[in-house]
Amino acid sequence: MSNEKKPVLRFAPSPTGYLHIGGARTALFNWLYARHTGGTFLLRIEDTDRARSTPEAIEAILLGMDWLGLNWDGQTIYQFARAGRHREIAEQLLREGKAYRCYATAEELEEMRAKQRAEGKPVRYDGRWRDKAPGPAEDGKPYVIRLRAPQTGETIVHDAVQGDVRFGNDRLDDMILLRSDGTPTYMLAVVVDDFDMGVTHVIRGDDHLNNAARQLQIVQAMGWPVPVYGHLPLIHGPDGAKLSKRHGALSVDAYRDMGYLPETMRNYLLRLGWSHGNDEIISTEQAIVWFNLENIGRSPSRMDFKKLDNLNGHYIRAMDDGALADIVLQHLGRQNPPVLLDAEKKARLISAMPGLKERAKTVLELAQAAEFLYTDGPRTLDDQAAKLLTGEAKAAIAALIDTFGSTQWTATNLEEKVRAFAEAQGLKLGQAAQPLRAALTGKTTSPPVFQVLEVLGREESLIRLRAWAG
């Protein structure tokens, strides 16, 4: 058996807002790779920005991960709680001469930047305290701890997605590790946490690529193992521009509320930047078997809502009727005011599901199409149904009510009765069945009308039909 260490991956969102679609894809890729390799998938909440981090955002992230089915191993780790450990490492680097105290004031630094801008130079810290020992004048004055970064040569990020990315060290300054109030910076906290958590692979958005070079300098200064980096291209809108709210840069729970299934989102996000030949429909189980880092694309991917809808329709049709009914019930329960169904109406919904799910692209559409099942009494007609219920059609409904009589109320028996009636009247089946559909559902489209009659039952069906019988 191999002694090779199993991969450890992490998803590390900042709780300054909801779990958005790009973050969800990052979480998915990390989760899939961990599951594919038999490794570990950890969740770390990077809540060091105390002003912007909120409990509501943390809860939204945890609920979004749960809804997507991306379970993590062990306890959720909170970065802020580890500030003492981060300070410890900054102090260690200071003792080892790999970091130094900088006493430059905010005014001095602003003056330095203004001068650099005026001279057309890159704006970066000029190392003024790098080789300067503090004297009596600095006693008791606030200072930051800065990394003594290499000033020549290159820092190379060996990236599993982007290839080798080179950064000239003359472009990277001596970054702050510890602020003057003793709080660690994000850059330091990330590196220390990744090391302490045993993270072997850092897979994240390519907006972190510049951070990787700086974080790598801390890793090297500490002599720690370098993780495998993989920076994912961003997701763009359908027009190729950076994804924004108008394109669908929404929270994961917004997609849930629009009626998309978690299975759909996992499949769609997987294909948004990763491919396996021409396969489009890839179950989660299959994705775990296939997933690798080599097949992640280098180019930004584009949101395609038509593709998302079609994929969702596929997963809706494939889902068990009872499980799908439960999701519709959850959806109705989140409405304002919530719509709650009793056992009889839920049974109606499950019975009608085979016909309902054939047409629906989203759970929202499914819930709207099923409205006639979970509300009782005569229907309000939509425009098309109202046009259909002419005087002649209403007379046909009245005649059909008499025809039904005491017949056993099953779809098969009712279809026989309607067929016989249509034949006797010289009508096509649709001419007799469509008015029934309009009166029963208020619409001109629904699951097969004889199934609708059976699902609603004799009493409820006759209440609705009599309301429109002429």
Image: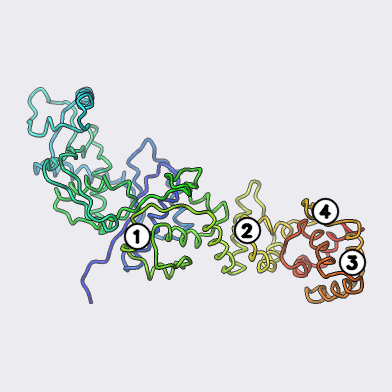
Q: Which mark is residue 296?
A: 1
The amino acid type found where label 2 is placed reads Leu
Q: Image point 34% across, 57% down: which residue?
A: 42
Quadrant that contains the N terminus:
bottom left
Which secondary structure, mark 1? Answer: loop
Instruction: Give the image location of residue 360, x and y in percent.
Output: 63, 61
Q: Which residue is mark 4?
A: 387
Quarter of the image holding residue 445? Answer: bottom right
Q: Observer-nearest residue: 396 or 401?
A: 396
- Name the residue carrying label 2: 329
Question: Rounded to the nearest whole Å, what is the CA distance between mark 4 and mark 2?
Answer: 32 Å
Which numbered disc, 3 or 2, marks the residue closer to the eye?
3
Residue, far front: 239
> What kind of element bears circle 4?
helix
x then y, percent, for residue 363: 60, 58
Which residue is rendered at x = 38% and y = 52% of the image?
A: 300
Q: Could you give the CA–CA distance between mark 4 and mark 1, rounded to whole angstroms?
A: 53 Å
User: What's the distance in space between the residues labelled 3 and 1, CA to CA?
Assistant: 62 Å
Please state which amino acid type lies under the numbered disc 3: Ile
Callout 3–callout 2 Cβ contact below 8 Å: no
Of badges 3 and 1, nearer the viewer stands 1
Of marks 3 and 2, which one's residue comes earlier in the chain? Answer: 2
Q: Secondary structure at mark 3?
A: helix
Q: Amino acid at mark 1?
A: Ile
Dot 2 or dot 1: first in sequence order is 1
Taking depth in this image into account, of 119 and 380 the one nearest to the observer is 119
For mark 3, what is the residue? 401
Crowding at mark 3 (Cα within 10 Å: few <14, some 14-19, many 20+): some
Q: Which of 55/201 is in front?
A: 201
